[in-house]
Amino acid sequence: MRAGIWGIGTYVPEQIITNKDLEKTLDTNDEWIRSRTGIVERRIAEDHIDTSHMSIAAAKEAMKDADIEADELDLILVATVTPDQAFPTVSAMVQKELGAVNAASMDISAACAGFMYGMITAKQFIETGDYRHILVIGTEKLSKFIDWNDRNTAVLFGDGSGAVVMGPVSDDKGILSFELGSDGTGGDHIRLDDYIKMNGREVFKFAVRQMGESSLHVVEKAGLTKDDVDFLIPHQANIRIMEAARQRLDLPLERMSHTVDRYGNTSSASIPLSLAHELSENKIKDGDTLVMVGFGAGLVWGAVAMVWGK
Ligand code: UT7
């Protein structure tokens, strides 16, 4: 039995903060941000909207898309490093709000690779046959932890949520292979004390190498070659990092998802937000082979190769 995606939903806050807006309060400029990161604008949640609210909105849309009812959910996995509070978990808050009375719930903390960790955890439960319907949400309100006076980080991040319902799919669809990894020796390069603090250059070097290697590994593990890949959905941290992964797979520009311009780096939400965007643009078709790959604080990483469709 293979695990795949049955439905998808998203939520992004209405408030848009452009690079030009940031120029007013920070020693930065639109040209620097665009050329070094690919970011043009980002969504920042209003004070009264927390991670759980965005998660619930995305989850409801995903449930509708998958055409399943709340009481059919067996497990809710929420990947986030910006929960409303340490507990109750965001996943339990989602479970309550959906009325998912038969679902277990658990938060997963793997920073920007969180959605990959979530999907791959869900895959295990589905493929053993223990669970049938699992909601996986990547969701962050990073703006809570941005030092708005630190130009090294303030220009990079945004808020948002993406959710998928996963379940069993036919033998020629779903997740073909995965890779997860961590290297805690790089933990100091990006950390959350009171605010996000980052050694950007070190994270950049790690990410360029890891995104390309993990993408290739999952293609090989699936018994495929680069030529078989139809679409790449990389974690949207920086266009230059994404480009490195694309080049390792020898994919043309139009076959890589690119939403960092509109959302910035939304950590665990970036892969599902990008997937939903490409689906809405009809860029991904039934039977397409996708590679998704993420990396983040820890340092950690994760990737999957999958065939789209049920
Ligand atoms: O999801 C994981 C989260 N983290 C990441 O993905 C971050 C990975 N790293 C990056 O994306 C890049 O390293 C950054 C975008 C953070 C920085 O780009 P860079 O090309 O590595 O720049 P840099 O850190 O080497 O800085 C170059 C210069 C510095 O000035 P000096 O020392 O050369 O005079 C910085 O102070 O750019 C300066 N700078 C800025 N200038 C204008 C740094 N931030 C800004 C800014 N506006 N916002």
Image (cartoon, rainbow, N blue to C red):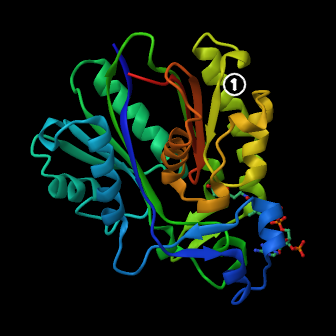
Image quadrant holding the N terminus, namely top left
Query: Looking at the picture, does residue 10 appear above or below residue 135?
Result: below
Q: Quadrant of ligand 1?
A: bottom right
Left or right of 8? Residue 280 is: right
The amino acid type, in three-letter code, at marker 1 is Leu
User: Is 262 situated above or below 228?
Assistant: below
Q: Position of residue 275 (x, y in %)?
A: 52, 41
Q: Quadrant of the C terminus?
A: top left
Q: Which residue is identified by label 1?
A: 216
Q: Which image quadrant is residue 84 in?
A: bottom left
The answer to whether 244 appears left or right of 231 in the picture is right
Q: What percent of the width, then of the height, locates residue 31? A: 83, 71
Residue nearest the viewer, comparing 2 with 183: 2
Q: Quadrant of residue 7?
A: top left
Considering depth in this image, is 202 or 78 the residue closer to the camera? 78
Q: Is residue 204 left or right of residue 5?
A: right
Q: Residue at x 59, y 50 (%)?
A: 296
What residue is at 53 percent from the left and 45 percent from the top?
271
Q: Residue at x 72, y 73 (%)?
A: 152
Q: Is mark 1 within 8 Å of ligand 1?
A: no
In the picture provided, is 162 more to the left or to the right than 226?
Answer: left
| Identity of the residue furthest to the bottom in this view | 25
Note whether residue 198 is visible. yes
Q: Farthest residue toward the left?
A: 101
Above or below, 83 against 247 in this view is below
The residue lying toward the viewer, choosing from 308 and 76, is: 308
- In percent of width and height, residue 88 lies at 22, 62
Task: Answer yes or no: is residue 299 visible.
Answer: no
- Residue at 24% in and 36% down: 67
- Tell me if mark 1 has few (under 14), some (14-19) or many (20+) residues whose alpha carbon lies within 10 angstroms of its own: many
Percent from the top left, x then y, of residue 48?
34, 79
